[in-house]
Image (cartoon, rainbow, N blue to C red):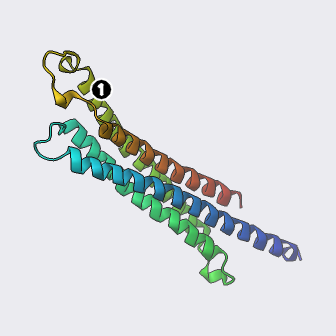
Amino acid sequence: MSQTPNAPSSSSNLRAIAQTFRLAGWISFWIQLVLGVVSGIIVLLFGIFNQRAGSPNNNPGTGFGVFLAVCGLVILGVGIYLAYRYTRIGKQLESSNPSNRPRKSETVQVLRLGLWVNLGGILVTLLGAQAIVGTLVARSISPQAITTQFFDPTRIISGLDMLVVQANTNTVSAHFAGLVGSLWLLNRINKA
């Protein structure tokens, strides 16, 4: 008897969770995708124009920072996939056949994986940003950059250098969007 009134409530609760998964998944997906594409284009341009052998701006510290930035973008690709997977979980939850629906434990496991992926991506990207910014600061405060007697073009910080810092900021923001989406969904599913 007590299950009859709860059945419609349970069904509407499941429908609400499914819609939340789809909405949060798509929002997270598109934010991460747009920021990731912009960051990827900037890092690619930086790699083409600044990291050629013999280039005056070729600096080992910047190279390592760009390597970490690329690693952050690769990890972001996994985060984008997981955000898309959230939309598919939402679609599966709307299924009228209970055997097609994922179990709560499987869903929580995917959400936790999303949390760890985005946290790892933030860490790697921040380390890359620190390496790049450290190199730019060292380049800007070196004695040769201050003196005007011997002009050294390798000490000039170009706009492309600053764009790489912006690309890292975009990547961190994309990982943060994925992290917020995963946390929100995890909170929502634990309330059910």
Q: Quadrant of the N terminus?
A: bottom right
Locate residue 147, reporting x and y percent: 19, 15
Mark 1: which secondary structure? helix
- Left or right of 163: which side holds 107? right
Locate residue 163, reporting x and y percent: 36, 41
Q: Residue furthest left?
A: 54
Q: Which residue is drawn at 35% across and 37% down?
A: 162
Disc 1: which residue: 137
State which quadrant residue 172 falls in: top left
Question: How many numbered discs sit on the rendered protein?
Answer: 1
Locate residue 178, reporting x and y percent: 52, 54
Pick the residue in front: 123 or 9: 123
State which quadrant residue 165 falls in: top left
Q: Residue at x 52, y 62 (%)?
A: 83
Pick the residue in front: 185 or 3: 185
Locate residue 94, reporting x and y percent: 67, 76
Q: Which residue is drawn at 28% across and 45% down?
A: 66
What amino acid type should be assigned to the residue bearing mark 1? Val
State which quadrant residue 7 falls in: bottom right
Disc 1 packing (10 Å; few <14; some 14–19; many ≥20): few
- Left or right of 172: which side holds 157? left
Q: In this view, does 101 lie above or below 132?
A: below
Q: Quadrant of the C terminus?
A: bottom right
Q: Is residue 132 above or below residue 32?
A: above
